[in-house]
Image (cartoon, helix red, strand yellow):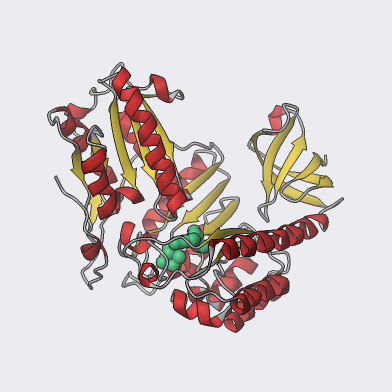
Amino acid sequence: MQIPSIKEARVRTKKETKMDVYKIHDNFKNIGIGKTYFIKTYGCQMNEHDSENIKAMLEEMSFKENMVMEKADLVILNTCAIRENAHNKAFGMLGRLKHLKEENPKLIVGLCGCMAQEESVIKEIQDKYKWVDIVFGTHNLDRLPEILVNSFHNPKTEIEVYSIEGNIVENIPVKRENPYKAWVNIMYGCDKFCTYCIVPFTRGKQRSRKPEFIINEVKKLIKDGFKEVTLLGQNVNAYGKDLDINYDMANLLKDTAETGIERIRFVTSHPWDFNDNMIDVISKYPNIMPYIHLPLQSGSNRVLKLMGRRYTKEQYLELYQKIKAKIPNCSITTDIIVGFPGEAEEDFEETIDVVNKCQFDSAFTFIFSKREGTPAALMKDDVPLRDKEKRLYRLNELINKYSKEKNDTYLHKIVPVLIEGKSEKDEQYLMGYTDTMKLVNVKAPHEYIGKIVNVKITDVKTWSMDGEIVK
Ligand code: 5AD
Ligand code: SF4
């Protein structure tokens, strides 16, 4: 048993990141014959991509995917720790699984992801959810086959979670969910330690993958018919800072663009590390999409300082203007937290002011959620819930107004759309995203799926648009 420690998770040393190569033991390859698995994924793209790795590892062990949780032999919850409601959802699901396990004692239940990295969660599982079979963390995903097999001989919960700074494991297999768009990890972890955020504790030290591994992965994806890659990391703009080779995100974007892949996106950016070279490369290469997610978090300098964000409102606005000047058609989206400890009405007005100045294409907005072990959890959470809710409501109204106004500018325009599949809203429609990441429902026959086509926008809503193919 190896349980996590919040104290150890905080440590950052100069130790070099170790690299390992995944290999499955031959003895494990038939373990899952005749059995099925179901994975429920919570949280961000990083988790979605981890689930793609978990699925592929299970399939190497001969398990088959089951879309119905109640019928599966193995259920894994890949959890998120970013806010309390993500926690509650996962624990709620564990409650449901308890009933399933009572009906079918052979059911194997596993928990992984960011919650597994939390000391308090592990204590709760050991106390109240003793029937969970396996728990593994974000640092040792690749150990799933061993952990699973070990649990067969262990009547107690098999727990293997490390709070180390983290290694990089190459060659983990992947079962990609989308045949046209692929996620590519470029780095793991985060060293920014924004005071509200649990990620540096759950995902460990910033570790960049070597550029050659990333570029080779992209080249292989092109061969396999993929049209789009999204370079993934908690703070992609800091890419390379931990490598000793004088190579940064601007270099990586350029080299990725030169592979010839049709579309490149990247998430998530921290304004602090967004340099001019990056903006130049994005503006120069047409296959780097004009879309940037640039979390603001707050418009108040006082709150930004309390959050440990390392930039001011003025610096954010300056960066925003610079991006817009060099990449005029760029769509910019953001993340904003309201009700951070000590946020006064005047601070919130500063946030509103930035939103009015930037007129974001869209935004994810959140009420501050206290995460145990983070510096902000020790600050006095003194904003009444009613005020937090009022601020969130007002902010969302404003964000939606600008989203609709931005979308209105697309009406009757012709834009490139990567058609991904059938639309959820109507069988006759297909769906896809523009270069600027706008969701478009397109009336077109199925043969267009997987192609980048020109679409004329015929109708515009707040969160989506309708269009027709231009021949
Ligand atoms: N409370 C509320 N929102 C948070 N985020 C991260 N941590 C917290 C927290 N403790 C938000 C930030 C981040 C996004 C992924 O989640 O806005 O950019
Ligand atoms: Fe969390 Fe992002 Fe800040 Fe890292 S940069 S601590 S992931 S909010």
Answer left or right for 272 relative to 469: left
Against 143, residue 168 (above or below) is below
State the residue in front, 330 or 148: 148
Q: Position of residue 269 (x, y in %)?
A: 51, 66
Quarter holding residue 112: top left
Against 243, residue 462 (above or below) is above
Residue at 73% across, 64% down: 329
Residue 332 in sight: no
For the image, the number of numbered tags is 0
Which quadrant of the figure contains the N terminus?
Answer: top left
Answer left or right for 257 relative to 49: right
Q: Position of residue 441 (x, y in %)?
A: 74, 39
Against 49, residue 109 (above or below) is above
Q: Position of residue 364 (x, y in %)?
A: 59, 57
Q: Position of residue 321 (x, y in %)?
A: 67, 77
State the residue in front, 199 or 81: 81
Residue 292 in sight: yes
Against 458, residue 260 (above or below) is below
State the residue in front, 317 or 440: 317
Residue at 34% across, 61% down: 372
Quarter holding residue 393: bottom right
Which quadrant of the figure contains the C terminus?
Answer: top right
